[in-house]
Image (cartoon, grey):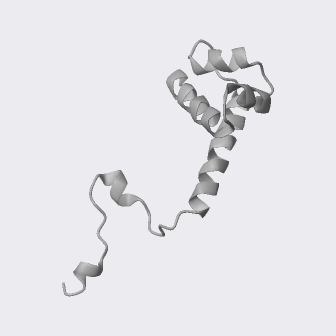
Amino acid sequence: MLNFQGKLLNRAREICGGWEVLSSKLGVSEHTVRLWHEGKARLPENVFLQAADIVLEDDIARAEHDRRKGPRVAAIHGSPERSGAGDLGR
């Protein structure tokens, strides 16, 4: 959990533009956010949810502007996507 919370906070920091802005959004000191990021303290559930919201809202906004319409199944399975166009005669 501590490793994941560090990744979550790092992504939220990237979205917000820095530790200072993120700590302000979370309503805590920058020092406290850095302790959580470094895994020196456990992230409280309410702050975890706030950070998750920051990341999810950004991901949703990016997805709305993504021109790809199909699911990303090929990326999950590690195989190249098949366009379907070459399979018409099969």
Residue 14: percent from left, percent from top: 60, 36
Drawn side of residue 67 relative to residue 75, left or right: right
Q: Quadrant of residue 87?
A: bottom left
Is 82 above or below relative to 9? Answer: below
Is 11 above or below relative to 40? Answer: below
Residue 6: percent from left, percent from top: 56, 25
Front in this rendered view, residue 21 or 88? 21
Q: Which residue is the extreme one toward the top?
A: 40
- Number of numbered tags placed on the structure image: 0
The residue that appears at 52% across and 29% down in the rendered structure is: 4
Front in this rendered view, residue 39 or 85? 85
The residue that appears at 66% across and 30% down in the rendered structure is: 18
Residue 5: percent from left, percent from top: 57, 27
Is 62 above or below relative to 43? Answer: below
Is 11 above or below relative to 43? Answer: below
The residue that appears at 73% across and 25% down in the rendered structure is: 20
User: Quadrant location of the C terminus?
Assistant: bottom left
Q: Which residue is the extreme one toward the bottom?
A: 89
The residue that appears at 29% across and 52% down in the rendered structure is: 78
Q: Which residue is the extreme one toward the front?
A: 17
Residue 37: percent from left, percent from top: 59, 21
Q: Quadrant of residue 74?
A: bottom left
Q: Quadrant of residue 43?
A: top right
